[in-house]
Amino acid sequence: MGRTATLAAWRPDPGNPKQQVAMLVDTTECIGCKACEVACKQWNQNEYRINQELGTYQSHPSLDAQTWTLIKFIEREDEDGVNQWLMQKHNCMHCSEAGCVTACPTDALHYGDYGVVTLDQEKCIGCAYCEPACPFDAIHVDKSAFRQTAQKAGKCTLCFDRISNAMQPACVSTCPTDCIKYGDRGELLKWAYARVEQLKAMGYANANVYGDKELGGLHELYVLLEKPEVYGLPVNPTLSKRLTFWKYGLQPVGKAILGAALFGMVINWFAARRTFKGGHGPGEEAEAPASLHD
Amino acid sequence: MAVRSKVKIKKFSRAQVVFHWVYGSSWFLLMLTGMSFLWRPDPGAAAVGLGPLLQGTVGQSFRLVHRVAAIGLMASPLTWLVGDFRSLWPDLKELLRFGINDARYMLIAPLHYTFGKPALPPQGKYNGGHKVNFYVVVLTFIGFVSSGLLMWFGRGAVPDGTFHMAQIVHSTSFWLGAIMTALHIYLTAVHPFTRRALSAMTQGFVELNYAKAEHKVWVEKEIAAGTAVLVEEPGDC
């Protein structure tokens, strides 16, 4: 399949912020060079951390608050006993129905232009509600940052600062094999499904597109050689029911009951000040005032 | 017009008063610093109300205050335990006994405190409302502490579903506690009649006439047993 020359020059329409952009990773073309990891660190000025797991070429065990892009290395035997070495560029999926945005109490995470889930670190208070809300383990709050700056969440921003200035995301612009493609989401999906057909014709029966329908549609799409679970990607992820109940059930009901209770107290006060004139209870007037000398 | 009693009866020890205010002030700080983040109903829209003021460093300061206040809340029972251990069991025993008289009180109280009738059944040191307030405080204390500690220290170590359940428990405790707090403050500081009970939690003493009207069983028992501590002081009426 052709390289991304057709997509390389693509820029979103600055006059149409509702346009859906995406990144597509053709994992079959990834060579695991980690240039995208370096470009991400460099552009975002994230701290370098040596955190290598033994027994793998993977640079970090997982994403963290300072590591927003990670090439995951998966070594396995397929059904025929053939060794496979799979690589998957892992970062924020920029979900259309994002758990992190639902959980964030301060608007630091929100749905930005072009379908990007943006994180404004200035607004973040480090509550970390976003961490367990993400089914992809793609956002983290830096636990170790206490002595440096304040604890803040960190995740891929799809280089919103670059793409909103007609540049490509840093990882896209540096990828030597052009396996990371960037462009209009609809066009990328067309390309992805055609690529999958091509792979199936080549004998890769499990090839599939990931991200088209998941969580309302992801803005990080994949062409995968194997089923999503092989890469550790959740199958048919959904927003946590507990999280949605907490946000859209419990909170409105709590506010309504508290409002009704306050209203009831106001009504009671108007009635009670007529009933209990001077603060005296019923029958109290008839009694002589109590005294120690009674 | 009735003349207010200058005689007061001791209802709470100094340790109990201190406990109440340590718990109350901690809870108030926790409520203010926590509830301010709940006013973001639509995550797709910009933050409204106090939301924009609470972002970033201000919000982080709130988070810090929230955690310091949480320590105050957790430690507050020590003030009662250490300061007046002897009153603990008798008071707890009464608070934990919820009888038919208390149930009748709860049914009648909304009408009584609005229209002055029907008459309330005679109550002990703690009326049915005090007891329900105590149950809510205990229940929310357990809810707050268990879910709060889990969210504070268990992040990343517990399954996501457990963390979300802790959020639900924390918020449920908040709404339950906030409604009870509003009612508690209204009845003890605003309501024309029952606000006369406030002195019990500021001075430890309450007007004898008021105590007779509201806690007849307790007052008669204390006087009969000779354990009532009465003082006469210049009233404010």
Image (spheres, coloured by chain):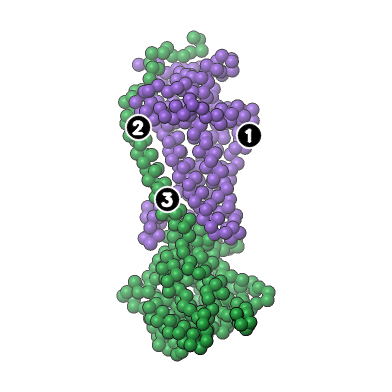
Chain colours: A green, B purple
Residue B129 horizontal/vertical position (percent): 47, 31
Residue on which the image places disc 2: A268
The secondary element bearing badge 2 is classed as: helix
Q: Is residue B236 above or below residue B23?
A: above
* Residue lying farthest to the front in this orientation: A80
Point 68% across, 74% down: residue = A54
> Which numbered disc, 3 or 1, marks the residue closer to the eye?
3
Q: Chain of mark 1?
A: B
Question: How far apart are the two marked residues, 2 and 3, measured between alpha carbons?
Answer: 26 Å
Q: Is residue B134 above or below residue B217?
A: below
Q: Residues within 10 Å of mark 3 (few under 14, many from 20)?
A: many
* Circle 2: residue type: Asn
* Circle 1: residue type: Leu
Q: Residues within 10 Å of mark 1 (few under 14, many from 20)?
A: some
* Circle 3: residue type: Gln
Same chain for the residues under marks 1 and 2 in the image? no
The secondary element bearing badge 3 is classed as: helix
Point 44% across, 60% down: residue = A102
Q: Is residue A157 above or below residue A147?
A: below
Question: How far apart are the two marked residues, 3 and 1, measured between alpha carbons?
Answer: 35 Å
Residue B197 horizontal/vertical position (percent): 46, 27
State yes or no: discs 2 and 3 in contact (Cβ < 8 Å).
no
Residue B107 horizontal/vertical position (percent): 42, 29
Q: Is residue A122 visible?
A: no
Q: Is residue B1 visible?
A: yes
Q: In the visual, does A90 lie left or right of A4?
A: right
Same chain for the residues under marks 2 and 3 in the image? yes
Q: In the visual, does A16 lie left or right of A237?
A: left
Question: How far apart are the two marked residues, 1 and 2, measured between alpha carbons?
Answer: 37 Å
Q: In the visual, does B140 lie left or right of A261?
A: right
Residue on which the image places disc 3: A251
Residue on which the image places disc 1: B81
